[in-house]
Image (spheres, grey):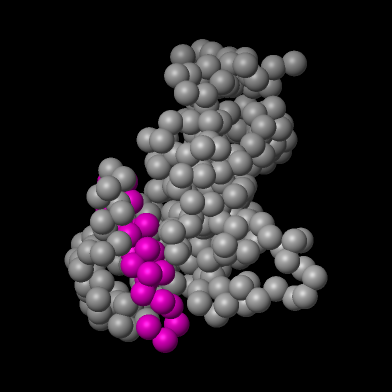
Amino acid sequence: LGDVRRRLCACPYGGREAEEALDEPAVGEEEALAPSRPDARPTLSSLEAAAQCSPLELRAALQRWRAVEVAGRWCCLDPQYEADCVECLLALAVEQEWPLHAVPVPAAVEALAAQFDEATVRHCLRSHSTAAAAPWEEWLAAAASDEVALEPRAICTFRARVLLLETEAWPKDAFDEAWADGVPRGIEPSDADLDGLAVLLPPDGRAAKGAPLTVRALSAEAMPPDAAARFSVLWSLKPSWAMRELGPYLLDIVAPGSSAEALVLQHARCVTASDGSRSYVERK
């Protein structure tokens, strides 16, 4: 799926003005800029033909990556454009006192019309709602819904992503405080919301009881597509990992019919502690 991800990110959607600028490349640059032109974005059928996975797995990945269909072709949203839109949606929900489980989509579209096109607003609401994990057809249909229920976990992950874009490493206490302050009242962030987004690192990468932790940005979406290179990145951060920590970073490279643990054991050895807990260290 690594190649699919690269194709989706080659020409992200950043709004109508950005789209118009991409449609008008400078003279002599057409060939060089071809991969980043809107008309070079992949169709769903071309992704299915190229992906080394089942159609079901491909669609699940598109939902997980918050991919969007623009004029019949697929891409990711520009990260800053997406962050700005979701930020505005959350501020609007608080200002209008909309319950997060019943956000009126047409009203949100109208309120943000000067900043974001309707398709973007609807997509951002869908991608951060309970519909994000729905079956494919339901997920597609959710873009036309009149009301959505925002998913607290998705909101927490979004806020964490924004904080990590500002600073890639935080003392955990400071991060937790900023994180809690940045989500709507009634939502409580959890370390599980950082899965595939950041890792918790003890000093020098080695666990020590009571030692202060650091929250370090590590996006699964930006990891190398090659398994050996990916594990090299992981080992460079800390020498020992629990399977629950590794899992989010392996989702898109586990071969069909295999498992994350089988892949891990190709690149690591398992160490069992006296309390029965297991961790994985680099195979040398």
- Compared across the picture, whether 72 is left or right of 184 comes to right
Q: Nearer the viewer, residue 72 or 179?
A: 72
Start-end of magenta stretch: 113-134
Identify which residue is drawn at 72% across, 63% down.
33
Identify the image quadrant of residue 265.
top right
Q: Compared to 192, does 114 lie above or below?
A: below
Q: Compared to 163, does 284 lie above or below?
A: above
Using the rendered image of the protein, determine whether residue 263 is visible from the camera's viewpoint. Answer: yes
Q: Main secondary structure of the magenta part?
A: helix
Quarter containing the C terminus: top right
Residue 18 is inside the magenta segment: no
- Compared across the picture, whether 133 is left or right of 104 comes to right
Using the rendered image of the protein, determine whether residue 181 is visible from the camera's viewpoint. Answer: no
Q: Nearer the viewer, residue 20 or 211?
A: 20
- Residue 85 spot, x, y in % from top left: 44, 72
Residue 114 is inside the magenta segment: yes
Identify which residue is drawn at 34% across, 67% down.
122
- Residue 71 spot, x, y in % from top left: 45, 64
Residue extending furthest bottom? 114
Identify which residue is drawn at 62% across, 16% down.
266
Residue extending furthest right? 28
- Compared across the picture, whether 30 is left or right of 82 comes to right
